[in-house]
Image: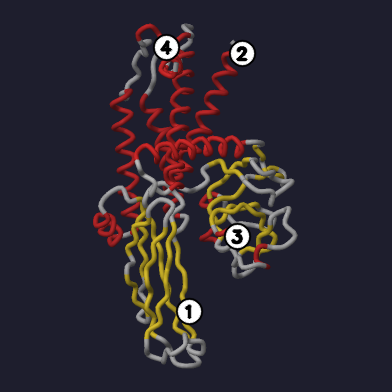
Amino acid sequence: MLRRTAADVFAVVVVIIVATLVIGQLTGQPVLLGFVTSESMSPTLEAGDGFVAVPAAATGDIESGDVIVFDAVELQGGGLTTHRVVDVTDNGYITQGDNNPFRDQEGDEPVVTDDRIVATALQVNGQVVRLPGLGTGIEAVRGVAENAQTIVAGVFGVETVDSRTLSGLFVAVGLVLLLVVFADDLRGRRDRDRSRSRSRFNDEGIDGQWIALVLAFLILIPANAAIFAPTGTQQVVVDGDDLPGGTAPGETVETDLTAENNGLITMLVLLETTSPDGELRGGELAVPSGGSATATLTVTAPPPGEQAVVTVSEHRYFLVVPPSVIVRLHSIHPLVAVGAFNVLVLGSVLTLVGAAFGFKQKRVRSRGRGISIRAEIRRLLR
């Protein structure tokens, strides 16, 4: 009995880990778990180590000593970076890898602002909760996915497919398959355990309401984090004493505003400004997975001794319905667009779970000949 219970607990833990990794791949945000790939945080985190990532929306105030995951601008070409906060200034946070001799801001990396922080590493008694080897295992899966990508690209002639996107999809599909196998194995053990105890998940049956609740939690929490984390404003300043060559006061100065997408789902990025000195062109950006898109801000050049300050707000939405629908809902209020997305996802989850399990406890009958998915997969691979 103890051995069986331990096996069930292990399966549940694996299911949770797999689910968080899959959702993290889809949203481009570390969801509950993250990992490092370099020695910059050694000995706190060695290359390949994982950690528990708390979404920025739930971390509260960032303090000196916290280890944060932020969207770097210059470090290693940009992208998510995990470093420690060593100082807090009025302009933002100063960061440094524990194994690095210099602060990030002593190079080209700008001060880290709140809108660029996506998660904080969980610490207990001042020590980062470390998961040895988690990242190594994920990288191994990624390597297999990239090899599979090469084979598929050669067979179907899709060399132009973005490698990052296709690799990420292979990883997600592989992890989902692992999730299904473990969940099926867990259910199989429950079905074989014909005890008299009454439980929602033993031979009395599966309650679809609990499945829907768990799936909604796992999907909506990180999805909303991916929507709200980049939301914010930025200021573009044009100084009348430092105008581009040949530009006279009253003429226009153009500035490119670039939006990036680190997830696997296309995002609709809406850039807006209410400043009379600025005008946005192409403020509705459909940013594909692993890609970027650019809008142009035109600002009227001020006279010498003055500055033109234009505030630009950014909102992000998953592009799961036509852009015109999202824009219309956003024009009512950003929360209306976010709410509609949540209703759509929740409705989809309820529909799928209801079709598969129903929302009443029902007796789970073993499949013909009692063959599990694990056994079926093994038989197919022979």
- In the figure, residue 84 lies in which quadrant? bottom right
Asked if residue 31 is positioned above or below residue 255 in the image, the reply reads above
CA separation in Å, label 4 and label 1: 66 Å
CA separation in Å, label 2 and label 3: 49 Å
Asked if residue 69 is positioned above or below residue 350 in the image, the reply reads below
Residue depth check, mark 1 versus mark 3: number of the one nearer the observer: 3
Residue depth check, mark 4 versus mark 1: number of the one nearer the observer: 1
Provide the secondary structure element on which disc 2 rests.
Answer: helix
Read off the residue under disc 1: 237
Asked if residue 369 is positioned above or below residue 235 in the image, the reply reads above
- The amino acid pointed to by label 3 is Leu
Instruction: Report the disc number at residue 203.
Output: 4
Quarter of the figure that contains the C terminus: top left
Badge 4 crowding class, 10 Å Cα cut-off, few under 14, some 14 to 19, many 20 or more, is many
Instruction: Report the disc number at residue 75.
Output: 3
- The amino acid pointed to by label 4 is Asp
- The amino acid pointed to by label 1 is Val
Instruction: Report the disc number at residue 263.
Output: none
Q: Is residue 201 visible?
A: no
Read off the residue under disc 2: 2
- Do labels 4 and 1 touch, CB within 8 Å? no
Q: Which residue sits at x=48%, y=27%?
A: 178
Sooner in the amino-acid sequence: mark 1 or mark 3: 3
Sooner in the amino-acid sequence: mark 4 or mark 1: 4
